[in-house]
Amino acid sequence: MEDTSELDIRLVPSHIAIIMDGNGRWAEERRRPRLAGHKAGVDSVRAVVETAREIGVRHLTLYAFSTENWQRPKAEVKGLMALLRTYLEAELRTMLTNDIRLFCLGQRERLPRDVLAVLEQVMRETAHCRAMTLNLALSYGGRNEMIRAIRKMAVKCKDGQFDPEDLSEEILAEHLDTAGQPDPDLLIRTGGEHRLSNFLLWQVSYAELYFTETKWPDFRKQQLLEAVATYGRRQRRFGKTGAQVRGE
Ligand code: IPE
Ligand code: IPE
Ligand code: MG
């Protein structure tokens, strides 16, 4: 697909989640340091955010740093954090212009203090934006998110705010970091691996999965449009029969 004019807006997912993988291998192929791959990956983030906004995606969730990624070499973690900070500082103006709200999923208090300060500033300044929510999953793990949600609910049960009997899927969802946001319709993973790596475990239960060999630094506008077009050709049945879904 060359441009966005032929996209059927009804077939655009309202929430896209992306596991941005393959930066390191992209760099290694070019005999460059892994950080060069992460740097090139930031340009993909810009392109994908811009395209998602352009085609009318309402929620875009990017897996930028997992709870497990803290185990990487110190220098790589440091480089990633520096890139994150630069990205946030540079993008604030664009987010405001494009009416994009920045939100964060994960244990952001584990981030270095300077990064956290910029992150919270951008979240505050874009809090009124409505066209699209950009969720950055930072120090994020799906299991960790669920444990934090369960803890919050346990405290409320103990305080008598509700009864364990009243717990429901809706109440659990309201205690996750994604509270108030719809579940992803489409989950994309770049870089050729076929796994979830602890990403949005609860929320992706009915997402359409799209795996591509393309490494994240090579995933730009055309690649996103291709993924969205593929999504548009799928039939989501949610347990029903094809005939039921077609309204026959
Ligand atoms: C994804 O790329 C970025 C992060 C996990 C932060 P990787 O750094 O995992 O790249 P590969 O998988 O080693 O190629
Ligand atoms: C998943 O990528 C995390 C992010 C994209 C931030 P990883 O490269 O860390 O995943 P694994 O370790 O290969 O499963
Ligand atoms: Mg990886």
Image (spheres, helix red, strand yellow):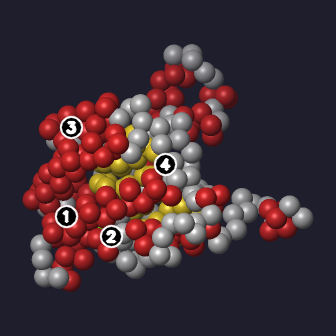
Q: Are marks 3 and 4 in contact (CB under 8 Å)?
A: no
State the separation of the CA atoms marked 2 and 4. Answer: 19 Å
- Mark 1 lies on residue: 39
Residue 226, position as x, y percentages in the image: 50, 73
Q: Amino acid at mark 3?
A: Val
Q: Residue, x 58% and y 66% (percent of image)? A: 7
Residue 80 in the figure: left or right of residue 53: left
Q: Amino acid at mark 4?
A: His
Which mark is first along the chain, 4 or 2? 4
Mark 3 surroundings: few (<14), some (14-19) or many (≥20) residues within 10 A = some
Mark 1 surroundings: few (<14), some (14-19) or many (≥20) residues within 10 A = some
Q: Amino acid at mark 1?
A: Lys
Mark 4 surroundings: few (<14), some (14-19) or many (≥20) residues within 10 A = many
Q: Amino acid at mark 2?
A: Trp
Which mark is first along the chain, 4 or 3? 4
- Mark 4 lies on residue: 59
Q: Does the beta carbon at disc 2 come under 8 Å from ligand 1?
A: yes
Seen in the picture, residue 10 relative to 25 is either above or below; the reply is above
Is residue 5 among the parts visible in the rendering? yes
Q: Report helix, strand or loop for mark 2.
A: helix
Q: Report helix, strand or loop for mark 4.
A: strand
Q: Residue, x 43% and y 73% (percent of image)? A: 222
Quadrant housing the C terminus: bottom right
In which image quadrant can residue 163 be found?
A: top right
Which mark is first along the chain, 2 or 1? 1
State the separation of the CA atoms marked 2 and 3. Answer: 25 Å
- Mark 3 lies on residue: 118
